[in-house]
Amino acid sequence: MPSARTLVHKFNDLKTLPHVAIRVTQLVNSESANMKDFEEIIKLDPILVVRLLKLVNSPYFGLVNKVESISKAVVYVGMKNLRNLVAIEAIRNLFQERDDYGFSRRQLWLHSATVAILSRMIAERIFGLAGEDEFLAGIIHDIGLIIEDQLVGQEVREVARLYGKGDKPITHYEDEVIETNHCKVGGMLVFDWNMPEAVVLAIKKHHDYDKAYPLPSITSILHIAEYIASRLNYGAIAGRHEPLPAYLTSHMKSRMADYKVLIKEFPAEMERAEELYRDKE
């Protein structure tokens, strides 16, 4: 079977990340970048311009006057939110359903969106963080499954079958059948995309439940978000629930009242996100 690196190389040959997405990610990571740099890149993609203006003029930002210029939109949205919007646009089509698949890509997209929103809510409401990097990690954390399905689809179907009736993490069955797993594959891909180091680590380790990761690291927040998402029946594969890693038990118990409020308010956040990011104009 091909290695994780071989799968990533093959995938990059088939599905290159759009130039705009690459440049925006580079600019976010650059200390010398300014808003004018972002404007020059964004205006090269008309669809992205439309979505950016739609986002900044949505009730989410609550602006009195309509924003019609790219430069003002970039200022209001912020660099990391812009990067996340670009990331969503870049990967959205990868989640389109196929006639033959080992799992539902629509279900996987819904799962990814749920984990992204929960990760941001946890970062903001539980830990007082901005939440942009946590959202990004959530939206792309299972990108490795898409790569595997694209390139070794028959094996992925076998993984899905074993996982559906088994009691071990999906990575166990991937390692058994494919001889690698989506955490390794996805981690390598987003490293190649120059994503933040903490985001890369979270994607590599989002099924590593045996090690304790510091709170509030992106990895630990992603673990909590995955657990809650599966309990809300938004798992990557229907019918399976992700465990809560033991190292997070005391934290969850100590903040249970806050998490109950967060879960209660999640549907409204999900609805708002669907309005902002849905694939319609």
Image: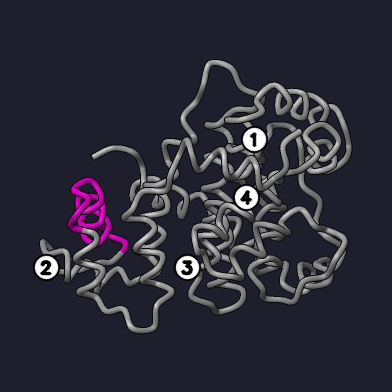
Which secondary structure type mostly characterizes the magenta part of the structure? helix
Distance of label 1 from label 4 (alpha carbons): 10 Å
Q: Residue 238 location in percent, x, y?
A: 68, 32
For marks 3 and 2, give the one nearer the viewer.
3
Q: Residues within 10 Å of mark 3 (few under 14, many from 20)?
A: many
Q: Secondary structure at mark 2?
A: loop
The number of discs equals 4
For residue 186, the mark is 4
- Quickly name the residue at label 1: 148
- Quickly name the residue at label 2: 65
First in sequence: mark 3 vs mark 1: 3
For marks 4 and 3, give the one nearer the viewer.
4
Distance of label 4 from label 2 (alpha carbons): 41 Å
For marks 4 and 2, give the one nearer the viewer.
4
Q: Residues within 10 Å of mark 1 (few under 14, many from 20)?
A: many
First in sequence: mark 4 vs mark 3: 3
Q: Residue 254 location in percent, x, y?
A: 77, 74
Marks 3 and 2 in Cβ contact (< 8 Å): no
Distance of label 2 from label 1 (alpha carbons): 46 Å
- Quickly name the residue at label 3: 132
Please state if 116 lies on the left or on the right of 176 as rendered: left
- Relative height, residue 157 to residue 192 (above, below): above
Distance of label 3 from label 1 (alpha carbons): 27 Å
The answer to if 32 sits in the magenta stretch is no
First in sequence: mark 2 vs mark 1: 2
Please state if 42 lies on the left or on the right of 92 as rendered: left
For marks 2 and 1, give the one nearer the viewer.
1
The answer to if 55 sits in the magenta stretch is yes
- Relative height, residue 268 to residue 166 (above, below): below
